[in-house]
Image: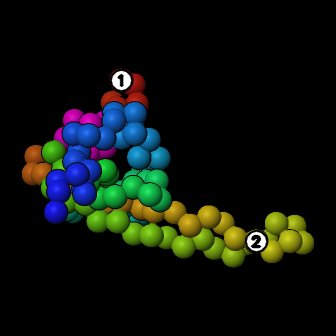
Amino acid sequence: MSQTAHPSITTLSKERLMNVLLAPHITEKTALAMQNSNQYAFRVRRDASKPDIKAAVELMFEVKVDCVNVVNEPGKARRFGKTPGRTQDWKKAYVRLAKGQSIDYEASRKA
């Protein structure tokens, strides 16, 4: 098998990596994960892979990522007036950072 079968992190463009993370996902559950296990949650593109997410977090926040877990969240049935519909499916990534690393959302917004 050739090495080009799996795209390496170095071949992904910085523009592509900057578009992988959509937003931080902050809930009570993710706040507890931040405190207890140094784990952060992000909404990510549905076509993003674990290596893409890891590279994007390391590029944008300049931290060392230990592991990445992803969850595909199904859309919910909603009504839009009289018309029944569905919200879009989306993907969530739980990113565990290496010991001693942390992400400061406020500092990264100002930069």
Disc 2 + disc 1, Cβ < 8 Å: no
Q: How is the image coloured?
A: rainbow
Q: Nearer the viewer, residue 6 or 62?
A: 6
Q: Amino acid at mark 1?
A: Ala
- Give the image location of residue 98, x and y in percent: 12, 51
Quadrant of residue 104 in the image?
top left
Q: Which residue is mark 1?
A: 111
Q: Is residue 106 visible?
A: no
- Give the image location of residue 4, x and y in percent: 22, 51
Q: Amino acid at mark 2?
A: Gly
Q: Is residue 103 located in the magenta-colored stretch of the structure? A: no
Quadrant of residue 66 in the image?
bottom left
- Give the image location of residue 7, x and y in percent: 26, 50
The span shown in magenta is 55-63
- Give the image location of residue 12, x and y in percent: 30, 41
Q: Please, which residue is most extreme toward the top here? A: 111
Q: CA distance from mark 2 to mark 1?
A: 39 Å
Foreground label between 2 and 1: 2
Q: Residue sitting at 62 percent across and 64 percent down?
A: 88
Q: Which mark is residue 85?
A: 2
The quarter of the rendered structure image containing the N terminus is bottom left
